[in-house]
């Protein structure tokens, strides 16, 4: 154990003498910590700033009939997606490449 301690102290002494090794060691200490900090900060609340995010909805549902009752599941889903109404909704026509931005 004494030999390991001597090697450790010798390495620290050489780090203080050699400036390039000091910068490299500092980078190896700081960069992973910075990377981890940024990732943790980003994943704390990913939905905090999505209130102005445009929502794209394509409804190609033609409806169905079950036991004599006609229903349109696509319309129900669109109603659910639009509540609460977004400030900006992206309406996309399925048969064209045209995108229309509609203010709500």
Image (spheres, helix red, strand yellow):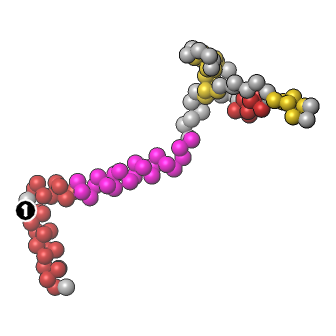
Which secondary structure, mark 1? Answer: helix
Residue 82 seen: yes
Q: Is residue 29 magenta?
A: yes
- Residue 56 versus residue 35: which sits nearer the camera? 56
User: Which residues are drawn in magenta?
Assistant: 27-47
- Residue 20 versus residue 62: which sits nearer the camera? 62
Q: Is residue 44 magenta?
A: yes
Please tell me whether residue 90 is drawn above or below residue 77 in the rendered image. above
Left-right relation of 80 to 54: right
Q: Residue at x 14, y 83 (%)?
A: 3
Q: Position of residue 10 (x, y in %)?
A: 10, 73
- Residue 16 versus residue 6: which sits nearer the camera? 6
Q: Residue at x 53, y 44 (%)?
A: 46
Q: Position of residue 21 (x, y in %)?
A: 12, 58
Identify the image quadrant of the C terminus: top right
Left-right relation of 83 to 99: right
């Amino acid at each position: 154990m004494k030999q390991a301690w001597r090697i450790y102290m010798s390495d620290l002494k050489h780090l203080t003498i050699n400036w390039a090794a000091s910068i490299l060691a500092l980078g190896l200490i700081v960069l992973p910590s910075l990377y981890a900090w940024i990732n943790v900060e980003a994943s704390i609340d990913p939905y905090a700033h999505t209130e102005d995010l445009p929502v794209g909805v394509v409804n190609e549902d033609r409806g169905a009939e079950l036991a004599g009752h006609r229903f349109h599941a696509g319309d129900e889903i669109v109603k659910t997606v639009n509540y609460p109404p977004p400030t900006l909704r992206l309406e996309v026509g399925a048969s064209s490449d045209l995108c229309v931005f509609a203010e709500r």
